[in-house]
Image (cartoon, coloured by chain):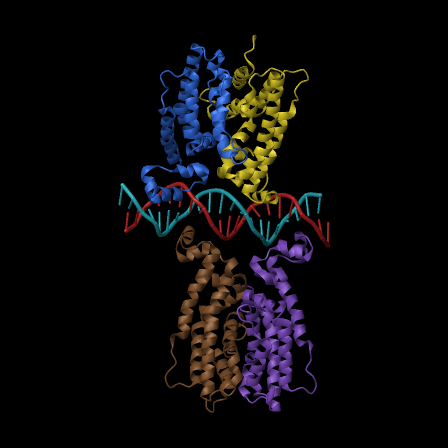
Chain colours: A purple, B brown, C yellow, D blue, E cyan, F red
Amino acid sequence: MDEFIARGFAATRLDDIARRAGVAKGTIYLHFKDKESMFEELIRTAIVPMINRLWARPPQAGASVRDMMEAFAKTFIEEVATTRRGDLVRLIVAEGPRFPAVADFYYREVVSRGLAGMRAMIELGIARGEIKQKNLTQFPQIVVAPALIAVIWQSLFARHAPLDAIAMFRVHLDLIFGERRAA
Amino acid sequence: MDEFIARGFAATRLDDIARRAGVAKGTIYLHFKDKESMFEELIRTAIVPMINRLWARPPQAGASVRDMMEAFAKTFIEEVATTRRGDLVRLIVAEGPRFPAVADFYYREVVSRGLAGMRAMIELGIARGEIKQKNLTQFPQIVVAPALIAVIWQSLFARHAPLDAIAMFRVHLDLIFGERRAA
Amino acid sequence: MDEFIARGFAATRLDDIARRAGVAKGTIYLHFKDKESMFEELIRTAIVPMINRLWARPPQAGASVRDMMEAFAKTFIEEVATTRRGDLVRLIVAEGPRFPAVADFYYREVVSRGLAGMRAMIELGIARGEIKQKNLTQFPQIVVAPALIAVIWQSLFARHAPLDAIAMFRVHLDLIFGERRAA
Amino acid sequence: MDEFIARGFAATRLDDIARRAGVAKGTIYLHFKDKESMFEELIRTAIVPMINRLWARPPQAGASVRDMMEAFAKTFIEEVATTRRGDLVRLIVAEGPRFPAVADFYYREVVSRGLAGMRAMIELGIARGEIKQKNLTQFPQIVVAPALIAVIWQSLFARHAPLDAIAMFRVHLDLIFGERRAA
DNA sequence: GATGAATGAGGCTTCATTCAT
DNA sequence: AATGAATGAAGCCTCATTCAT
């Protein structure tokens, strides 16, 4: 997987994968039909731990919705955006159009579920009066958008200008929940 | 360019490019040193019209900052996100890490300039009292984030669930400027 | 090697080499980095048996220096000049300037060693009184020169006028040792 | 011609020839049928001035045969062996087997004529009593051999060990004419 | 006559895939 | 089950040759 992440599907050689995996090239074909299906299966299995990381920290009992979202964002940024898992997301964006099976799987397992969870949180926020804006429910993507920006920024522009993703996300939450009084 | 967008750098064959361009394979090498520099130069020249499209419609005289941002977003979504130019952005995200020259150029010409322009608009909005939240100035990325989401959604998930990018952006602007009273 | 000898480096096709070797084209690259290093390595390994042939027949115990030189020349002409090994020498002359590594190796392994051996023989000849001319020690090349002529003549002019290389060398030895009384 | 000498037939590009000649590539085809015939014709025309150089200095009236040969060798070494014309000889040795027309022409115009001239000189030397060894007449190649060695040495081994070709030729002439008493 | 842009055949090299061991 | 040497299709690139201007 690391090889695919570093070089993309086409530029990754089975030779390198085999060496990295510590097996012979032929052995790969005992587990996968060909390079394409290996790529698809690897992505699938790599996504699972990412999902687990994301949903690992359950919201605390008495937490505000804002705290929950902030905790979620913190997890995402620390566990995904700034790690190799973030490049996994970029890899999916990069190869998705040529691997519909990958895009499908990612949509089903990550995107739609993530958005559903986010929508639930928004509705809770509205119900509790923390969130004023009702129509946000229609577009939970908006809440997540800066997190995706962070992922892309990290691998494309970090060396031009570092981005404090957590600070950015706090400002974003200020938009949604209103600014906090004290820092 | 269309070939690169459709297949990515590595999977694109010079044969196809030549056929599409209506020239012989050898002719390509009268214009480009090799496949890599062709890719980089094509991207560079393809970005320019995209920039022009984006900054083509000047803000109207008496317009509010929100109107300006909405107009900008509309332009972006209509001229970029829902066209082949959007795939160009995705291509840059996909190949950027392996083509630093491309990422650099994109950062310099599009990202840093775009963010600077956006920051200026935010400051104007704050000065005019349209925008309450002062710290938004630090992260103009937040304003643009849903637009990027729209680009990615378009080419990865559109067939699973269509996304009304303009409506999404309006909701996002509601967060920044406060909800409008009437539709 | 035969292909390189027959056509020179540039005009030799890997296709032909592979076919002649009875392997697929790709197999070549399991043994050599590229065409150039294959050429250099092949030449190196082809020179070794040539050297062995040359130094194979040890000078007989009671032989005169002239006999030793004549035996050496006979070996060279029979084993090199009139065989494919002679074309190897011509190949080195032809491609040497463009393959310094080849020229270097040939100088080290064949030329400098050969000249050293020849110089030793000349000194022995002088010590024994067989050779009158002392300054010949400075240029052992002179002794070998007709042998090289024979190699070149063989592949360039043999069909215009055959050359009896051994007879020529005997005349040359007559210059060095003085004419023999009987045939 | 310089391009062919520097790189050999196959590795020389018509592009470079045209640039060096200060004409366009197409213009070459107004003068030559193709690359091969251009090579052959260029070699032919390049050989002519070499021949002229060689036979330019006529033997002086009262000169001894040894003086004549020494003058000839001096001319050859100064005008051919140590100049680009020497590489022309090496080029012919290199490409001759693949360009029979070249080898033929060279044999006819240079080799056979040169050997005939040399044989005449030898006979004169024998008639005058300068040369003792009668059978040298059969192999005038022997007289010329060190000159050819000098040419090859120059382009292959000069940087390993410089060779004083004129001194070598004098030693060689000592073999033929007997050593001179004083230097 | 001269040009040089365009051509496309052909060469070198890579690498996914196979299969005898 | 595992190996890795061998394969050969396919891609990039070069360059002799052509031909419209």
Residue occupying image coordinates x 68% and y 73%: A52
Q: In the picture provided, is A12 more to the left or to the right than B164?
A: right
- Residue farthest along the front direction in this orientation: D182
Q: Please name whichever residue, A64 or C179, is drawn nearer the observer in this view of the structure.
A: C179
Res B157 visible: yes
Q: So how many labels did they put on this image? A: 0
Percent position (x, y) of residue C183? 56, 9
Q: Please identify the quarter of the rendering in which residue D31 is found.
A: top left
Q: Is residue B143 above or below residue B92?
A: below
> Residue A63's x, y, as percent?
67, 86
Residue at position x 46%, y 14% in the image:
D137
Question: Along the horizontal axis of the image, is C34 left or right of D144?
Answer: right
Front residue of C48/C124: it is: C124
**Whole-percent x, y for residue B149 in the image:** 52, 74
- Can the viewer see residue C162 in this picture? no
Q: Quadrant of residue C120?
A: top right
Residue at image point 48% right, 72% down: B112
| Camera-side residue of B60 and C181 | C181
- The x and y percentages for residue F4 are 67, 47
Question: Along the line of sight, which residue is nearer the eye, A32 or C167?
Answer: C167
- In this rendering, the answer to whether A133 lies above or below B42 is below
Pick the quarter of the image with the N terminus of chain B.
bottom left
